[in-house]
Image (cartoon, rainbow, N blue to C red):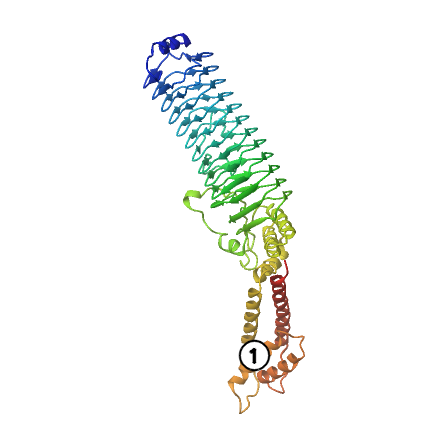
Amino acid sequence: MAGPDEWTLMLKRHKGPKPGFHQQHFRSPKSDQTLDFRKHTFSSDLDSTLTFTDCEFFDPVDFSGVHFGAGSVDFSRSVFHRGVNFKGVRFEGEVMFRRAKFLGNAHFRSTHFQATPNFSDATFCGGRVEFSDAQFRATAIFQRVKFQCGLVDFAGAKFVNSVMFDAARFSPVEDHDNTQSVDFSKTELGDGEFSFQGAMFNGSRPEARSSQTTPTLKVDFRGMELKASALDFKSAQFSWTRLDLSKTTLQARSVSFDEVRGAHSDIVLDGATIAGALMFTPEHWAHGSIFSLRDVVIEGQLTISKLSGQLVPDLRGTRLSHPLDIHLDCYSRREFVTTADSVPPDSERVTPEPRSRIRPPFRLQKWAAPYRVCDANDAARFRRLKILATEAGDHRQALDFNAKEQRAGYWHSTKGWRLVLHGLYDGVSGYGQYVRQPLVALLKCTFLFFLLYLLIGVLIDVPIPKDFDVFDKLAGALDFAIAQVVPFHGANTDARKTGAELLFGNDVLIPWYVNLLAISQAIISVILLFLVGLGLRNLFRLR
């Protein structure tokens, strides 16, 4: 068939309850000729189903401008080998493309779907998919659809009811313009739910020798207006993907990223306005990822938890109407010490690493100065989180963010001898958060100096009295060491004198190097006592 006249004639000859075709092969009379049915009306008063099930279209098909009547249209399991054009088509009834295959370009631009369009389990590959400016008056179903094409375009589309992309797979391939994008920009969504539960967004992995570390798949929702009840990405998976929701207006009761998984992927909501709650609780999200909420206005509750590795949410300029609920495991002492040399699993390994990592010219002890170098902007992100925690009255969390802010500055704003001091302060007390660590350090310090005093007392050349007892040396070394712990207390003067007599004898002057050790111990002990007190103060401080 070559045009609408032949098509109309075949419909008139069909006497069954379901006019149409089944398992038919459509070819144009001449090679490379388009199967043209433009501006044709398919019986607007038809109430039965028009079927094209299991058909194959071997040449380009053009339905642009066609008006399908109130009856349903079924293209289930059909195969379009060289593209299809439904531009400006109006479907009054339900239209089904279940398990259909689009092996070329699929154009649905400005198409009107008055009833439910069902694309479940369909496959788009080998070209571009365009639903720009399309209108969906009923629930749109794209469940388990596979998008394997350079561009998936829903820009300017209008959804009046729910949209379901559950378990859909977005794995675009580069087209002739080297494009890999999914475009939902300036989309309008009405009542219902916008669901991407279990969806997968997989960008192309850069070659092993490539210097590219940024996501290759762009998923663009910029400027979208969402009036749906929920925007749900629960259990979605992202790989080498940038999900951009910048400057969107989300009137949904909730925006959920619960149990999502991502690697080398970014989620950006900069400048968005969210009327409901936002929840970001990934199951796994790491390896050079970004979660940015800069200048976002959130009127509901913001919940962020289960974050680890180097993912630091960026809330600079964010305005919240409720206290921040956030729990981070990233940038802890454990993270710095144990993962600096860790190797990611083979499935997630990439060269080069997404974050810079520089070894200093000399390697200090890990407890003194961790050498892992992180994003220079993370310090500012933690500073904003610290301010939000302080405003919420969460003193414990504010201390934690302060510690992480300082750690994120290692080898950036903190260098040289200041890095050594920061490393010691962090290693001993966690920037004033801990009581046990400085207390244990004080006990270890006292025991170490006790051993030094005992060794000196045994080796020093002094007369040994007849009633000498080895336990006197032990008691003397212990008294002398404990006396330096609180040197400013009067009772310690007598303890120091007694310990010195037992160690060195009554008539022997204390060696100068012992005095030097005693002064060093006293200084260290005072510092550790101060850190113990600081930890106790922060522990029992009223929130």
**On screen, residue 421 above or below 257:** below
Can you tell which quarter of the image residue 47 is in?
Answer: top left
**On screen, residue 255 above or below 379:** above
Is 24 in front, or is 47?
Answer: 47
Image location (x, y in percent) of residue 95: 42, 23
Can you tell which quarter of the image residue 126 is in?
Answer: top left
Image location (x, y in percent) of residue 525: 61, 70
The residue shown at (63%, 49%) is 388
The residue shown at (50%, 34%) is 193
Q: Is residue 260 left or right of residue 409?
A: left
**On screen, residue 169 above or below 388:** above
Is 113 in front, or is 282?
Answer: 113
Query: Residue pushed farthest bottom?
Result: 466
**On screen, residue 233 above or below 401:** above
Can you tell which quarter of the image residue 23 is in?
Answer: top left
Is 531 in front, or is 505?
Answer: 531
Label 1 neighbour load within 10 Å: few <14, some 14-19, many 20+: many
Q: Is residue 391 left or right of residue 460?
A: right
Look at the image and tell me whether residue 173 can be seen.
no
Image location (x, y in percent) of residue 415: 62, 53
- Identify which amino acid the numbered label 1 is placed on: Leu
The residue tagged 1 is: 478
The residue shown at (56%, 33%) is 227
Image location (x, y in percent) of residue 411: 60, 51
Quarter of the picture containing the C terminus is bottom right
